[in-house]
């Protein structure tokens, strides 16, 4: 069986990998045929779904490999996305971070193993491109972009005063009292300033991120596996490392603990909350979905799957002050709180060298640049980038062989800003 912990996309980045064209899943013929040839099969059971280049197929087919719940789009008609495509955007030039050599927008897409990207300007599609296995009607795994959805739910409940951000997590979930989360506040979860024994290191086979994934059934388990059998069970095993509130340390389990709080106070599943409060109000074209463990508990830290255009609709709703289809979806005050950001000194402790001067608020990444841009981010290159000043929203799905965004940011972030400047001319 493949050793996923020592063969992660991040680890593979140390070895030569093929270009986007060479690893195109259509060219390689993954999962084609009835049945596919043995050397073209991608399976969950052997872990091949998370290896590169198989990853370039599986991220656009994750719902075929792992159980999920539907996030209903509701019964309202799909809201139109008017098109006003431009012929001057492929040539937009920028310098990647740390490089004196410029490149253009079109070349940056395969360089970052982009599966699909949509650029909205003033609510209109000005650029749309699909590569690899992704198609307009197909969903793609969003990874940690999911966290920003869950953060919005929680921040909205704080605004409504149904959730006390200063209350300890154990007030809502007594089952977590003996864990590291017991004396953490809801606000500390939201801004990820908790002290937890949990390493989000995809190159370390002993990092807790892998144990978390196995507990939730997102990775195959070895025959002698005796660990936690669910997300809930894993959360109760997490121990403290240092004090809460000392600085920003990005750890996926904060979001899963927050998801437990939200389920407890609402009496609803995350899937139903996301549908009722967000997805059914956007005029989406398609249902979304979210991965679940063996008990049906959603992976709030990274399990969302959506179509690209619907992800862009969501981002543009936020650019529009939380309004979509003529009604308020997210309270304006919640968005104002996100855009103000959080403690930048706390953020420095996270070690994100490609994000100088940024902060993290309500599970959103806040640039504090002159345009007030803010983001949702996920491993392997998933992103929503919102630039209020440029009236621009970018939604991007990708399958980069490097998991961590610090390997992807040097080209992506300057490209996004260059596109904003071009659209403002």
Image (spheres, rainbow, N blue to C red):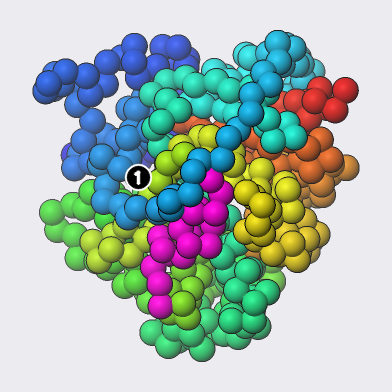
Q: Residue at x 50, y 70 (%)?
A: 258
Tell me which residue sits at (19%, 26%) in the image.
41
Q: Is residue 178 visible?
A: no
Label 1: state its secondary structure.
Answer: helix
230 relative position to 116: left or right: left
Q: Which residue is mark 1?
A: 5
**Along the line of sight, which residue is nearer the eye, 39 or 272?**
272
Q: Position of residue 161 (x, y in %)?
A: 64, 81
Q: Is residue 109 above or below residue 321?
A: above
Camera sees residue 83: yes
Dominant SS of magenta comes to helix
Vertical arrangement, residue 381 with respect to residue 323, above or below: above
Residue at the spot 40% in from the left edge and 46% down from the top edge: 287
User: Hey, which quadrant is residue 339 in on the image?
Assistant: bottom right
User: What quarter of the picture does the N terminus occupy?
Assistant: top left
Q: Is residue 286 above or below residue 178?
A: above
Q: Nearer the viewer, residue 300 or 212?
A: 300
Q: Nearer the viewer, residue 294 or 248?
A: 294
At which x and y percent is residue 179? 44, 80
Describe residue 185's horizontal placement relative to residue 24 as left or right: right
Does 186 appear above or below 284? Answer: below
Relative placement, left or right, of 42 versus 128 is left
Q: Which residues are magenta?
A: 267-284
Q: Is residue 64 magenta?
A: no
Please provide percent x and percent y for residue 284.
50, 43
**Quadrant including the C terminus:** top right
* Residue 390 position in % (x across, y down): 81, 35
Q: Residue at x 34, y 71 (%)?
A: 232
- Magenta segment includes 277: yes
Label 1 crowd bin: few (<14), some (14–19), many (20+), radius 10 Å: many
């Amino acid at each position: 069986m493949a050793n996923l912990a020592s063969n992660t996309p991040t680890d593979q980045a140390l070895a030569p990998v093929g270009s986007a064209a060479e690893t195109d899943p259509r060219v390689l013929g993954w999962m084609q045929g009835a049945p596919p040839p043995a050397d073209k099969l991608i399976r969950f059971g052997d872990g091949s779904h998370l290896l590169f280049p198989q990853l370039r197929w599986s991220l656009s087919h994750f719902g075929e490999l792992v159980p999920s719940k539907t996030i209903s789009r509701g019964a309202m008609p799909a809201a139109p996305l008017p098109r006003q495509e431009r012929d001057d955007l492929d040539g937009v030039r920028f310098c990647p971070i740390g490089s004196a050599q410029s490149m253009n927008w079109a070349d940056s897409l395969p360089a970052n193993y982009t599966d699909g990207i949509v650029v909205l300007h003033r609510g209109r599609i000005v650029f749309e491109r699909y590569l690899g296995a992704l198609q307009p009607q197909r969903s793609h795994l969003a990874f940690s972009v999911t966290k920003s959805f869950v953060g919005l739910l929680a921040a909205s409940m704080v605004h409504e005063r149904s959730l006390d951000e200063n209350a300890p997590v154990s007030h809502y979930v007594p089952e977590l009292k003996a864990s590291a989360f017991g004396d953490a506040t809801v606000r500390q979860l939201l801004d990820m300033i908790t002290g937890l024994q949990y390493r989000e290191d995809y190159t370390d086979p002993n990092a807790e991120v892998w144990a978390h994934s196995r507990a939730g059934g997102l990775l195959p388990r070895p025959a002698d596996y005796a660990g936690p059998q669910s997300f809930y069970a894993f959360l109760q095993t997490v121990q403290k490392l240092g004090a809460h509130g000392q600085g920003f340390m990005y750890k996926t389990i904060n979001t899963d603990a927050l998801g437990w709080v939200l389920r407890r106070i609402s009496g609803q599943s995350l899937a139903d909350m996301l549908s009722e409060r967000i997805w059914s109000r956007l005029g989406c074209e398609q249902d979304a979905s979210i991965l679940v463990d063996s008990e049906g508990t959603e992976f709030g830290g990274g399990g969302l799957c959506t179509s690209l255009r619907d992800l862009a609709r969501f981002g543009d709703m936020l650019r529009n002050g939380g309004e979509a289809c003529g009604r308020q979806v997210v309270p304006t005050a919640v968005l104002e709180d996100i855009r103000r950001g959080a403690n930048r000194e706390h953020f420095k402790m996270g070690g994100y060298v490609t994000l100088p001067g940024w902060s993290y608020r309500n599970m959103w990444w806040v640039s504090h640049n002159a345009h007030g841009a803010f983001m949702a981010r996920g491993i392997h290159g998933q992103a929503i980038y919102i630039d209020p000043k440029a009236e621009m929203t970018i939604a991007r799905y990708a399958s980069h062989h490097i998991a961590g965004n610090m390997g992807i940011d040097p080209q992506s972030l300057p490209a996004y800003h260059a596109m904003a400047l071009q659209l403002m001319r």
